[in-house]
């Protein structure tokens, strides 16, 4: 049996049949005036994942004008079904807090303070240091003459806070550079 | 399993709720008062009907639901004829007293029905099935008569189905219904709500509620859907779902679909301990209907109180 | 986790040990308590009474570091009282295998031990093979050389007297746990083990978990609904970051990192690909060459050809037997052998063992790049208390990072569920994603090599590396694509199209995948499956809370791994009420089974433990470095000088480093008689770097404390709230005394042993809240994982006058 | 119809969601706290904490009992503080008949420090606190401004365990009786604290003194309670303390 739901829409949705307030003799001016005077807020609901323990509770972020205004547990996620613990519930203050780092910074040898820098400057400085060490220290052959292509004097540690995609990029970069001192929170 | 509500309780709920709405928004008085009164009549009638109607032959449902077909679509409503006539007789005076503008049209429907020229059960069947020939055939008609007849069919059928729906709700809940239309009567939702935290014996992190349910405009059945689901186009938008609300009205909003431009009012029951008579709540959000339509969005379902002109 | 979070509701018994789930994985307890309401028994075994204990059926205090004694006693109980699930044990575990005649265990040591190198030669830890090359078996389990009999003999010593004397648990409590938990050794009951860092952070960490696995195999609790060995992962995406191997010894997808001995791809494959002659063993790792080839092809793209060994030669080779993990990295750093490096999103100056040394080690770097959300003990190590920045020569680059909610991508939860999260807001200020930083940095380096050349430039410049970071492109890279037109079954795939499943990965360079277990997460047919939010399930799936259409789970969307063990050899569920899979009308229904083959008893059937070479659950586990059976050894720092099981006091194979800053206290030292255990607390996250910056959370848990029993406090003249010093040979830590009945003194070998507990969430970068507890913990580690022994060491406690770290 | 809370301590896990939600809704700044040997922090109610989860533990034989008590104003049916306040400054303290809320207004700033002491002493539960900077007397407001708009108090909305409940008093009393019957099976000592006198009803599963000194007001009071509370408010608190310290 085939019932096309579009048909219901045609009936009940498009309003072919039924009365309007006007026909019923209801004065709609007050409600229109009231609606006009209201301060209206448009908000987006975006599903994210709590950044703490590995239950990965889903969180619905309410975002207005690009700003996070509130969060709630996602009631549809089969695991948390809308529930959150104290940390998960504090997402808002966590993203808003005053102590967030907001600019790349540099601390020179012997200096007692941080200096704000641009991303371009920072990448350039780091890249030249990496290249300098790698060009000098990369062990291409070991003592027995075997090809090893490893760089022991640089390290990379972190992080389980990264997404899978970022972890994959990190791993590819690290092995490309020849780094073997690699570790992260899986050990702590 | 849902049970039929007790009319006296519903009446109390509607009264307390509409009083609350009007205290907040007296501008809605002209809309809320007559419909609240009508809903009270409907609730009384539903209780009455419940005592009259026998149980529905449930075995006729078969695999309809699992195939995505609502229980009551496309079946003969002849077994409801008596109930519909009864409902109309019971509701007509209330309609006339609340809406004097359509008294003549209602009078004419009453006459035709009394003379047997109008079969409400056929009209109801067609109404749900998507056809409207019965109304067209009743010639000659004025536009007001035609619209009033639609209103009457909708109203009486709704009263009858509201008393039937609870007995079918358990069956509907058995399968994971993931459509935007009602699993029982196939109508579109009038309003959605976010649920209150469940009262479970579990002592630990039971969840804060917030599950979204659609409330059927016709039979009043509530069914669970995902939060970012659009009933009209049945798409999910977990990255760009939108809603808007008035600045100082927590828990009252309108969800809009970025894909198909339909809207649906929504009440967040976690924000209130007020009784949840959803039809009354929907009327109480008429100002949001005004706004949504001014922004170019379309309602899921046409009702008198969201049809302004 | 072998199982998943919702599946906890299916258990009849819980053994929560080495975990404080209610406080640290709060939502897990929602499901635990659902089971409890239906009558499940919830057992919490832990040194401290916590909120987990408060909501469990009962709590059993255990001296930290004696889990194997406790579990060994349970194994003995299960065997002696015949509580094990016999059919399961005989059919699905290696209980019936005959072990090499030369295998032996004496005085706490297994055969093959070399005291000089502190290493085992595992040659004798092997099975006897028949003429066909299959392991010899005695299904009656009577042969004295069969695994079952050796197991029985091994745990004979673990009687109630011995176990009680060393663990500090009363015999009554031991029996209570053993009885209630081993009641799940029947087909229709399930018991689950929930553990976390309380098990891994010991010098016998891996063997703690092995012991639990053995209990679960004996009781037939692996592969079934409500069963399994469930690691409650401690970090937000630590499952994923481990899958992608941010670890020295692995490359993505649990493949071993190449070492110097394996010079060519063929060498690698030969050394790493297990073989079996048993047609009934799936021996899944025989596919390893396909996964490595796809990884290399993913990294080096067009440049990787059959002629150049898919660029295998460019990949760094570790020196055989050399450990490059934290402990050795920071030791080498301390010795001045490391010039610079990257620390992304972690706070080792607060969370590593022996942080005094780690902090001093970091001073020896020329430069370091740190990426963080806030200033931390690590980002600002150059200005830590007690040092003059003027004398600190290290350059610091500090990169502000984006929060989870400020970026999109996937994370993998503890139960291997790969979940897409959308970006809700822009990152704060100029903060950026790690992806932006990594891709940008590598491009800056590449540009230099392209322009100026250098040492082995092709290792970098040949890589298939994008211009900018787009998360979903990397999801596709994880999944993998075809590098030429390919037919899979009757379906044609064009070059560049996504690989549908890891069964289609190839060893010839015709496919890519940056992590084979993720293949299938993003397909041509279904798009990005990590975004799925469909609650649909069959009635069978609904019964056990399986949500196959919600997101996507590795491997191949299988929600409960080893699920072939949940059915009998003919494919009938052991417990029909909570069936995971079932063989019906010639096909499997329920969960995705462990491989498509028919049930084990049929002609083309396979054994259930498909990742094991022989296909059987390993009661005898030859793969570990410290023995095939777990054996009780004391923590390296222990309050006792002997234990009842053998003269071998501590692990004969644990790892350590030596320097003047790596002092250890000798066993039973009267100067440091108190056991210290460390943990998290609910209101702060791990090292506390994030949560100490949220004022309302800091208000509730503002400062470092040390929890101790009223009995110990009385002995030491300490009152609740008093300032105290906790000290040992490595350092002194100031804390506030929290005198509580939630910690009880232990009766160990007739004497009282006190235990104190401290959180490690506090650090100097938050003013006056106290500083790193890990200044007290030792740099000694598990031989298999090199995870530090953070959960048990020795200290003394004394009342202090005025404190300087806390005010 | 007056409103009431049911605080079901059998379900409380001391997650402190209510404590933090209260601060956030009322925009109360964080206190600079110290560790003093307890997880209970801040140590007491203060002008920036209208709500505080109290921790209390003891041994019962070998079994540890760890009790959690989310403390707040009880919104008494006959609030002694309201009667005392009325004697000092008109409308400084309002007793809203509609909701049952006892609300301290800005006008409490006009009450002197001594006057505050009288009000604090009149409270059988030691709730009121005075902001020394502004002179305003503060405490839980029942989220009056939320409740009159049909919303739930912030702490109730935040509670993930079903500990915090709110609604019409009759409904809450019913729920309280239901829950009491249910938990008595496991905890025979369970009781409803002062249910007849307050709008914030605690379901306790252990002896009241094992939660907090002021978890209940008084036992076995013969004289008329209204009179007692209104007239003898000041000595009452001390009396209770003496009683419980025995």
Image (cartoon, rainbow, N blue to C red):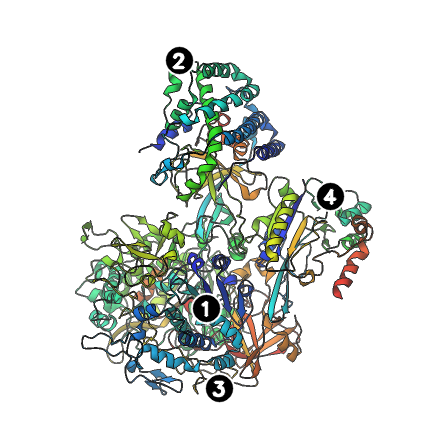
What subunit carries mark 3?
Answer: C
Q: Picture quarter containing residue A151?
A: bottom left
| Residue that numbered label 2 is attached to | B139
Mark carried by residue D95: 4
What residue is pinned by disc 3?
C642
Q: Same chain for marks 4 and 3? A: no
Crowding at dot 3, Cα within 10 Å, few <14 / some 14-19 / many 20+, comes out as some
Q: Position of residue C287 (x, y in %)?
A: 24, 64
Give C388 or A93, whichever is nearer the viewer: A93
The residue at 57%/48% (across/down) is D157
**Marks 3 and 1, how far apart at CA:** 29 Å
- Residue C181 is marked as 1
Give how far across and how far down residue B36 sits, in percent. Answer: 56, 28
Instruction: Give the structural element (helix, strand or loop) at label 1.
Output: helix
Could you tell me how far apart the alpha carbons at marks 4 and 2 are, in whole angstroms? 65 Å
Q: Nearer the viewer, mark 4 or mark 3?
A: 3
Kindly check if marks 2 and 3 are in contact, taking CB atoms under 8 A apart as contact: no
Q: Secondary structure at mark 3?
A: loop
Label 1 to label 2: alpha-carbon separation: 79 Å
Q: Secondary structure at mark 2?
A: loop
């Amino acid at each position: 049996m085939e019932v096309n739901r579009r048909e219901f829409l045609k009936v009940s949705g498009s309003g072919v049949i039924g009365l309007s307030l006007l026909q019923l003799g209801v004065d709609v001016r007050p409600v229109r005036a009231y609606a006009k005077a209201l301060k209206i807020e448009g908000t987006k609901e975006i599903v994210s994942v709590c950044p703490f323990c590995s239950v990965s509770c889903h969180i619905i972020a309410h975002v207005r004008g690009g700003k996070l205004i509130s969060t709630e547990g996602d009631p549809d996620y089969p695991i948390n079904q809308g529930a959150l613990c104290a940390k998960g519930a504090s997402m808002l203050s966590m993203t808003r807090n005053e102590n967030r780092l907001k600019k790349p910074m540099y601390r020179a040898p012997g200096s007692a303070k941080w200096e704000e820098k641009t991303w371009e400057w920072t990448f350039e400085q780091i890249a030249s240091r990496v290249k300098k060490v790698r060009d000098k220290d990369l062990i291409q052959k070991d003592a027995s003459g075997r090809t090893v292509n490893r760089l022991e004097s640089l390290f990379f540690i972190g992080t389980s806070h990264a997404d899978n995609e970022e972890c994959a990029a990190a791993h590819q970069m690290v092995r490309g550079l020849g780094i073997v001192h690699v570790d992260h929170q899986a050990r702590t | 399993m849902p049970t039929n509500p007790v009319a006296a309780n519903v009446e109390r709920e509607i009264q307390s709720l509409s009083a609350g709405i009007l205290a907040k928004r007296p501008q809605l008085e002209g809309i809320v008062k007559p419909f609240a009164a009508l809903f009270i009549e409907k609730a009384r009638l539903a209780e009455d009907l419940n005592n009259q109607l026998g149980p529905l032959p449930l075995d006729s449902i078969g695999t309809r639901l699992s195939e995505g077909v609502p229980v009551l679509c496309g079946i003969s409503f002849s077994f409801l004829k008596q109930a519909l006539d009864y409902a109309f007789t019971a509701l007509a005076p209330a309609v006339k007293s609340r809406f004097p503008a359509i008294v003549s049209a209602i009078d004419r429907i009453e006459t035709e029905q009394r003379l047997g020229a109008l079969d409400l059960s056929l009209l109801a069947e067609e109404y749900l099935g998507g056809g409207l020939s019965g109304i067209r055939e009743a010639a000659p008609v004025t536009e007001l008569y035609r619209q009033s007849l639609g209103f009457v069919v909708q109203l009486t059928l709704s009263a009858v189905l509201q008393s039937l729906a609870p007995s079918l709700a358990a069956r509907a809940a058995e399968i994971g219904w993931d459509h935007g239309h009602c699993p029982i009567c196939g109508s579109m939702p009038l309003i959605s709500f976010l649920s209150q935290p469940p009262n479970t014996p579990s002592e630990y992190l039971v969840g804060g509620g917030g599950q979204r349910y659609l409330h059927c405009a016709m039979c009043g059945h509530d069914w669970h859907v995902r939060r970012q689901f659009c009933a009209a186009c049945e798409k999910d938008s977990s990255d760009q779902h939108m809603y808007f609300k008035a600045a100082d009205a927590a828990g009252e909003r309108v969800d809009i679909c970025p894909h198909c431009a339909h809207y649906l009012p929504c009440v967040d029951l976690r924000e209130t301990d007020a009784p949840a008579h959803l039809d009354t709540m929907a009327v109480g959000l008429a100002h949001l209907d005004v706004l949504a339509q001014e922004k170019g969005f379309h309602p899921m379902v046409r009702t008198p109180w969201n049809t302004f002109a | 986790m072998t199982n998943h979070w919702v599946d906890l509701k299916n258990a009849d018994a819980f053994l929560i040990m080495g975990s404080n789930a209610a406080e640290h994985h709060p939502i897990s307890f929602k499901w635990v308590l659902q089971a409890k309401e239906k009558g499940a028994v919830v057992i919490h075994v832990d040194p401290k009474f916590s909120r987990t204990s408060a909501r469990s059926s009962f709590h059993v205090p255990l001296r930290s570091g004696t889990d194997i004694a406790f579990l060994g006693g349970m194994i003995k109980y299960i065997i002696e009282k015949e509580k094990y699930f016999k059919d399961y044990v005989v059919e699905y575990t290696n209980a019936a295998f005959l072990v090499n005649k030369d295998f032996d265990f004496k005085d706490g040591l297994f055969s093959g031990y070399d005291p000089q190198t502190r290493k085992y030669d595992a040659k004798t830890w092997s099975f006897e093979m028949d003429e066909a090359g299959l392991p010899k078996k005695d299904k009656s389990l009577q042969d004295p050389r069969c695994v079952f009999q050796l197991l029985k003999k091994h745990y004979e010593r673990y009687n109630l007297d011995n176990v009680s004397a060393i663990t500090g648990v009363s015999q009554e409590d031991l029996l209570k746990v053993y009885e209630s938990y081993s009641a799940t050794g029947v087909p229709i009951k399930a018991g689950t083990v929930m553990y976390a860092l309380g098990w891994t952070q010991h010098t016998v960490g891996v063997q703690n978990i092995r012991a639990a696995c053995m209990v679960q195999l004996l009781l037939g609790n692996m592969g079934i609904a409500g069963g399994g060995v469930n690691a409650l992962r401690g970090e937000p995406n630590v499952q994923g970051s481990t899958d992608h191997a941010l670890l020295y010894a692995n490359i993505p997808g649990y493949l071993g990192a190449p070492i110097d001995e394996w010079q060519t791809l063929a060498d690698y494959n030969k050394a790493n690909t297990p073989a079996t002659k048993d047609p009934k063993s799936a021996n899944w790792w025989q596919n390893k060459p396909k996964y490595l080839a796809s990884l290399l092809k993913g990294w080096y793209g067009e440049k990787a050809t059959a002629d150049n060994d898919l660029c295998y030669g460019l990949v760094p080779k570790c020196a055989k037997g050399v450990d490059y993990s934290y402990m050795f990295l920071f030791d080498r750093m301390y010795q001045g052998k490391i010039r610079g490096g990257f620390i992304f999103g972690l706070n080792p100056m607060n969370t590593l063992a022996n942080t005094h040394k780690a902090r001093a080690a970091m001073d020896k770097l020329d430069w370091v790049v740190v990426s963080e959300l806030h200033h931390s003990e690590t980002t600002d190590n150059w200005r830590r208390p007690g040092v003059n920045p003027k004398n600190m020569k290290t350059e610091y680059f500090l990169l502000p990072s984006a929060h989870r909610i400020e970026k999109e991508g996937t994370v993998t939860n503890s139960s291997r569920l790969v979940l897409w999260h959308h970006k809700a807001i822009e990152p704060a200020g100029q903060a950026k994603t790690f992806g932006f930083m990594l891709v940008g940095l590598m491009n800056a380096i590449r540009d230099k090599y392209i322009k100026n050349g250098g040492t082995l430039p092709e290792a970098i410049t040949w890589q298939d590396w994008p211009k900018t970071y787009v998360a979903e492109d990397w999801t596709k890279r994880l999944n993998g694509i075809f590098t030429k037109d390919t037919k899979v079954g009757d379906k044609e795939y064009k070059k560049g199209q996504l690989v549908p499943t890891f069964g289609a990965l190839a060893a010839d360079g015709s496919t890519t995948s940056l992590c084979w277990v993720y293949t299938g997460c993003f397909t041509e047919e279904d798009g990005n499956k990590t975004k799925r939010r469909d609650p649909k399930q069959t009635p069978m799936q609904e019964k056990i809370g399986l949500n196959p259409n919600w997101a996507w789970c590795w491997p191949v969307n299988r929600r409960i791994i080893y699920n072939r063990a949940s059915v009998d050899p003919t494919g009938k569920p052991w417990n029909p009420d909570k069936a995971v899979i079932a063989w019906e009308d010639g096909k499997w229904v329920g969960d995705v089974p462990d491989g498509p083959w028919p049930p084990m008893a049929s002609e083309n059937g396979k054994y259930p433990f498909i990742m094991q070479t022989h296909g059987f659950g390993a009661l005898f586990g030859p793969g570990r470095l410290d023995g095939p059976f777990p054996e009780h050894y004391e923590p390296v720092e222990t309050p006792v000088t002997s234990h009842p099981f053998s003269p071998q006091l501590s692990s004969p194979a644990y790892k350590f480093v030596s320097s003047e800053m790596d002092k250890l206290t000798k066993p039973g030292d009267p100067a440091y008689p108190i056991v210290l255990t460390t943990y998290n607390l609910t209101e702060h996250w791990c090292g506390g770097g994030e949560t100490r910056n949220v004022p309302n959370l800091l208000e509730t848990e503002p400062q470092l404390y040390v929890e101790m029993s009223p009995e110990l406090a009385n002995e030491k003249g300490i009152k609740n709230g008093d300032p105290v010093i906790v000290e040992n040979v490595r350092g002194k830590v100031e804390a506030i005394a929290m005198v509580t009945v939630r910690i009880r003194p232990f009766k160990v070998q007739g004497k009282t042993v006190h235990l104190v507990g401290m959180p490690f969430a506090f650090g100097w970068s938050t003013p006056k809240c106290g500083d790193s507890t890990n200044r007290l913990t030792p740099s000694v580690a598990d031989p298999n994982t090199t995870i530090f022994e953070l959960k048990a060491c020795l200290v003394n406690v004394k009342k202090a006058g005025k404190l300087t770290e806390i005010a | 119809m007056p409103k009431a809370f049911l605080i079901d301590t059998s379900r409380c896990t001391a997650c402190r969601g209510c404590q933090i939600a209260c601060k956030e809704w009322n925009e109360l700044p964080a206190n600079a706290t110290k560790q003093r040997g307890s997880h209970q922090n801040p140590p007491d109610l203060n002008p920036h904490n209208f709500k505080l989860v109290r921790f209390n533990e003891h041994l019962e034989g070998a079994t540890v009992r760890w009790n959690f008590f989310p403390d707040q104003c009880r919104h008494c049916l006959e609030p002694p503080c309201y009667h005392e306040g009325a004697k000092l400054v008109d409308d400084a303290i309002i007793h809203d008949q509609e909701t049952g809320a006892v609300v301290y207004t800005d006008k409490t700033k006009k009450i002197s420090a001594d006057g505050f002491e009288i009000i604090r002493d009149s409270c059988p539960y030691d709730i009121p606190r005075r902001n020394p900077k502004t002179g305003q007397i503060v405490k839980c407001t029942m989220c009056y401004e939320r409740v009159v708009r049909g919303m739930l108090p912030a702490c109730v909305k935040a509670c993930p365990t079903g500990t915090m409940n709110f609604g019409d008093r009759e409904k809450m009393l019913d729920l309280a009786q239901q829950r009491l019957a249910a938990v008595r099976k496991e905890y025979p000592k369970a009781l409803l604290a002062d249910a007849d006198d307050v709008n914030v009803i605690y379901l306790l599963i252990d002896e009241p003194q094992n939660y907090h000194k002021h978890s209940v007001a008084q036992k076995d009071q013969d004289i008329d309670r209204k009179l007692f509370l209104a007239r003898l408010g000041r000595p009452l608190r001390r009396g209770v303390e003496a009683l419980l310290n025995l």
